[in-house]
Amino acid sequence: MNIEINNVNKFYGYQKVLDDVSFEVKPGEILGFLGPNGAGKTTTMKIITGYIGMDSGDVIIDGKSVKSGETKSSIGYLPENNPLYLDMPVVDYLKFSAKLQGVDKEKIESKVREMIKLTGLNKEKHKLIGELSKGFRQRVGLAQALIHDPEILILDEPTTGLDPNQIIEIRELIKELGKEKTVILSTHILPEVEATCDRILIINKGKIVANGTSKDLRQQAEGNNLLKLKLEIYDSNAVVGKLKELPSVEDVVIVNDKEGRFDIKSYKGLKSNREIFDLCVKNNWPIEEMIPIETKLEDVFRDLTMN
Amino acid sequence: MDSILTISKKELAGFFESLSGYIVLIAFLGFTGFFTWLYGSDIFIRKQADLVVFFSIAKWTLFFFIPAITMKLISEEKNTGTLELLLTKPLNESQLVIGKFFAAFFLVAIALALTLIYYISISYLGKVDHGAIISGYLGLLLFSAAYIGIGLFASSISKNQIVAFLLALLIGIFFQIIFDILGASISGVWGKIFDFLSISGHFDSISRGVWDTRDIIYFLSVCILGIQLAKENLVNRK
């Protein structure tokens, strides 16, 4: 199912938390929703699920507005902090969720079993939810979101509080689900987005500041190529002079005079590796290190969200 | 309708899983039993085979116990965030509140059903006016429905259960006593209005076996108003 968010504005009191937000998500796509705390990620997700309203604009899911209330059954939602009934046993809770979602009575048992298997809750299924560790609770939250086989999954920080193994498991699960479903997940763990999402949306102060694949975003932010170079030489100034003469090199900075470390910045769109290598060979300067510095998603994120 | 039932069943099961259901039942039976059979102007002092004592005691026990039952119904969902889970499922605010109402109503009905043993006992002690007793029980059910409505409204106001409990008592005391006193001490139109607002007057006439549609309309209006306001409070989160 398609999700279209059209010019959504939302105020909390006088504070504008969403400022003309528009984007679209297609079936089979996993959209990563990034942004600093308080940027409006959770608010956007709550609006898509229909839990809170908007002051203007609309969210259209498969041709229907969320305001109609008819879209709820096609959405599986894992809210932030994963609220659950702690005094309910896992199985009872999943049955309760299935009933509310309108799963056929005959199918409830088998659905619950399927979810327990899918999320690996078999050993814990008769425990009270309150007795489970955070990782298992997260699985219960995911199981209740998936129980009616929704076409859309909205996951608000699905991996917070999990250990590294659990994070990888949940990620794999989301990837698997994302093959056929429309998935929106929010996080502020950047490697997670790169690992799981097809597309990234960065939101800051209620505005969308970037929208594209992680590769797109990196290229967008990538200005000049940077290289770290370490040579086994002692006359740094002479080296700098010669490096600067290279056509692709814009600037050279001596990082450490005695160790022969340099930072080399090339002109926009040019790579200087080869020329530097040739120069070093010609002058017989043994290269100890030559490290390209990639623009990381972290840098893109900082660039876009820091003022 | 299915969703309402699902909510009611879950809530009712919750009362008994958390023991609060049992505590309410035992305390209700303990209080009413003690005052009906053992203490004060009890049945043996009155020397009449009726349940007048029980009905007037039940009026006060329910007054305190219903807020204790209703206080967590909505405020807890708000506090733990589970309200978000519920309302993002195909369930609207009215269905949620009505489901909760029936859960509380059913718990009170169980408590009242258990006191039918008093009825059976007195029917061995003398000639009983069955009509008055049945009328009294129906009156108690209507009375409870009104207070559950008030309790749900109070519970929808705050995330804090204690606040919800105290607020329900505060609103309740107006209906239970204050309107009655105002009605008696003020003359004219206002006196009549306060008199009509007092829950005690309506309940007393029903528990004597006098049925008047105005009494029934009164109880149902308070109940529906409470439910409606609770629903509005939930809708207003948006």
Image: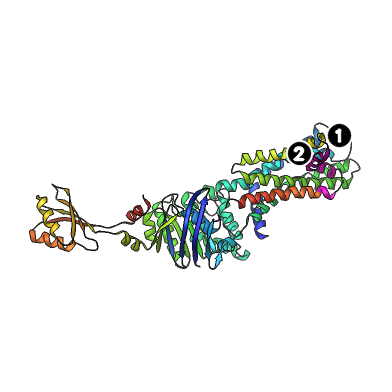
The residue carrying mark 1 is B44
- Residue located at (63% from left, 54% from top): B93
Image: magenta residue range: B187-215
Tell me the kind of residue under disc 2: Gln
Res B145 label: none
Q: Position of residue A208 (x, y in %)?
A: 42, 58
Magenta span includes A2:
no
- Residue located at (51% from left, 54% from top): A10
Instruction: Decide if residue A45 is on the left or right side of residue A236.
Output: right
- Residue located at (84% from left, 43% from top): B207
Instruction: Decide if residue A258 is on the left or right side of residue B232.
Output: left
Secondary structure type for disc 2: helix
Q: In the rendered image, is residue B173 in sight? A: yes
* Magenta residues, dominant SS class: helix
Secondary structure type for disc 1: helix
The residue carrying mark 2 is B176
**Letter of the chain that mark 1 sits on in the rendering:** B
Instruction: Decide if residue A287 is on the left or right side of residue A45.
Output: left
- Residue located at (62% from left, 65% from top): A106
